[in-house]
């Protein structure tokens, strides 16, 4: 049976990406899934794999077709998490596609990969 695995993010510096994403999402590196060009991260509570980082020579896309949505429950939590992620090395994206009164903030990781922090209390459906 086919099953969905976990997202893979292309990065130019695997150790730097490991440091950012483990701190950002409370993940830990999975020792048995490690190489100089590939690193899998799992949930710190041992509940399973979450994200893979793969060495890539291609530049990050300005408007990627696939990206991560990181979810929070309130506007205050969104503001706090955005500032925390920026402190870890993320940056606000110069996003030109925001709708009026967006429920999300677009950031980029240290490699320039875009991701969103979504406030579920303001999301159109109330959940993702």
Image (cartoon, helix red, strand yellow):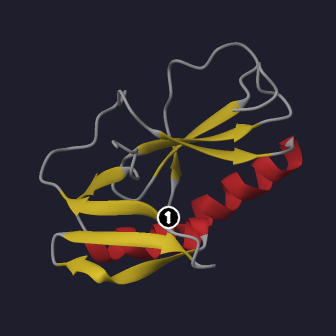
117 horizontally vs 63: left or right: right
Asked if 71 appears above or below 41 in the picture, the reply is above
Asked if 41 appears above or below 90 in the picture, the reply is below
30 horizontally vs 11: left or right: right
Residue at position x 82%, y 52% in the image: 77
Q: Position of residue 122 (x, y in %)?
A: 83, 28
| Residue toward you, 50 or 97 | 50
Query: Which residue bears the numbered disc 1?
Result: 89
Disc 1 on helix, strand or loop?
loop
- Which image quarter is the N terminus in? top left
Q: Position of residue 74 (x, y in %)?
A: 87, 44
Q: Position of residue 80 (x, y in %)?
A: 78, 57
Q: Position of residue 46 (x, y in %)?
A: 57, 79
Which of the 4 image quarters holds residue 35?
Answer: bottom left
The residue lying furthest to the top in this view is: 100
85 horizontally vs 122: left or right: left
Residue at position x 51%, y 69% in the image: 48
Residue at position x 50%, y 28% in the image: 95
Asked if 123 appears above or below 25 in the picture, the reply is above
């Amino acid at each position: 049976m086919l099953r969905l695995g976990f997202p893979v993010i292309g990065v130019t510096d695997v150790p730097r990406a490991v440091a950012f994403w483990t701190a950002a999402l409370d993940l830990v590196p999975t020792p048995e899934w490690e190489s100089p060009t590939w690193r899998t991260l799992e949930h710190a509570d041992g509940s399973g794999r979450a994200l893979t980082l793969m060495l890539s020579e291609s530049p990050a896309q300005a408007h990627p077709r696939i990206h991560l949505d990181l979810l929070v429950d309130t506007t205050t939590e969104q503001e706090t998490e955005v500032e925390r992620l920026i402190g870890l090395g993320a940056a606000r994206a110069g996003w030109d596609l925001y709708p009026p009164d967006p429920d999300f903030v677009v950031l980029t990781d240290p490699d320039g990969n875009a991701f969103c922090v979504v406030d579920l209390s303001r999301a159109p459906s109330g959940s993702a």
